[in-house]
């Protein structure tokens, strides 16, 4: 079989912004957990056609793999971005969804996220989506840092629970870079 990845299958450390990252989760292990998530989602939404909502930018790699493993008869995927504002209300940060043109009224929505860290983004996202009267909203996150959670609840579907360390690759970035790494790396501790 021909592989189009230029990255060596022998995983080595990578350096970004002068920081060293070491191999953390291999592509085979990522695919195995995504298959498990897809099986769970297919089972839970057996007679439904959930709308997958991929949160850009980080989740696009995960969403592409998850979506192709969830073979619903009329599967749809939409892409959204989340924009943050500051100081526009007494509560501080107000967030807004960009690019959601789909009518989600009465629909089962699965938010697809790369990672849930503090949970702030997830809470805001669920709040804004709930205002549009969906049938249900659940979240599938490839990665979850339970020890970092400050708000909300754990995602309903989690690929990996990981420690509160900075990671990159497989869609996750550092200043926009490293999203194209097929495996996941973690900042080296010395
Ligand atoms: P939150 O803290 O749960 O709101 O997560 C906010 C966002 O921070 C996530 O959607 C990611 O884009 C980013 N993020 C959190 N942890 C990491 C990480 O370890 N590497 C890269 N991005 C991260
Ligand atoms: Mg994100």
Image (cartoon, rainbow, N blue to C red):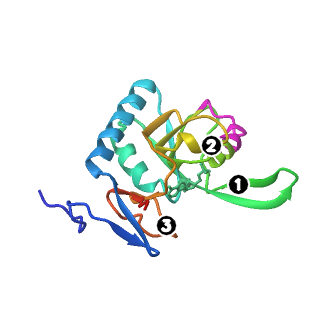
Query: Ligand 1 shows up in which quadrant of the image?
Result: bottom right
Question: Is the distance from the Cβ of mark 2 to the nearest ligand 2 atom less than 8 Å?
Answer: no
Q: Earlier in the sequence, mark 3 or mark 2?
A: 2
Helix, strand or loop for disc 2: loop
Query: In the image, is residue 28 part of the stretch drawn in magenta?
Result: no
Check the image and name the residue furthest to the bottom: 18
The answer to whether any part of residue 72 appears in the image is no
Q: Would you name the residue on which mark 3 appears?
A: 174
Circle nearer the N terminus (3, 1) = 1
Give the residue displayed 61% in from the left and 42% down from the top.
Answer: 149
Q: Is the C-beta separation of discs 1 and 2 under 8 Å?
A: no
Residue range in magenta is 125-136
Closer to the camera in the image, 8 or 34: 8
Foreground mark, 1 or 2? 1
Residue 154 vertical position relative to residue 175 in the rendered view, above or below: above
Query: Left or right of 85: which side holds 185?
Result: left
Look at the numbered disc 3 and say if its residue's Cβ is closer than 8 Å to ligand 1.
yes
Q: Identify which residue, 165 or 144, lies in the foreground.
A: 165
At x 29%, y 40%, the residue is 32
Residue 80: percent from left, percent from top:
57, 54
3D distance between C-alphas at marks 3 and 1: 23 Å
Q: Quadrant of the C terminus?
A: bottom left
Category of crowding for the residue at label 2, using alpha-carbon neighbours closer than 10 angstroms: few (below 14), some (14–19), many (at least 20): few
Dot 3 crowding, Cα within 10 Å, few <14, some 14–19, many 20+: few
**Element carrying mark 3:** loop
Q: Which mark is residue 103?
A: 2
Most distant residue in the left direction: 1
Outermost residue toward the right? 90
Cα gap from disc 1 to disc 2, whole angstroms: 16 Å
Residue at numbered disc 1:
96
């Amino acid at each position: 079989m021909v592989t189009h990845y230029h990255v060596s299958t022998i995983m080595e450390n990578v350096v970004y912004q002068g920081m060293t990252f070491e191999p953390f989760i291999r592509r085979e292990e990522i695919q195995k957990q995504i298959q498990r998530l897809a099986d769970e989602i297919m089972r839970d939404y057996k007679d439904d056609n959930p709308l997958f909502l991929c949160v850009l930018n980080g989740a696009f790699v995960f969403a592409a793999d998850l979506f192709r493993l969830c073979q619903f008869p009329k599967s749809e995927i939409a892409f959204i971005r989340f924009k943050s504002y500051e100081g526009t209300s007494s509560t501080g940060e107000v967030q807004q969804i960009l690019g959601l043109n789909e009518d989600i009224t009465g629909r089962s929505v699965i938010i697809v996220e790369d990672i849930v860290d503090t949970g702030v983004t997830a809470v805001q996202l669920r709040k804004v989506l709930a205002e549009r009267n969906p049938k249900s909203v659940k979240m599938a996150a490839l990665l979850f840092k339970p020890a970092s959670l400050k708000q909300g609840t754990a995602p309903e579907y989690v690929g990996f629970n990981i420690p509160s360390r900075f990671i990159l690759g497989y869609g996750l970035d550092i200043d926009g870079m490293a999203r194209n790494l097929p495996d996941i790396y973690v900042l080296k501790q010395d």
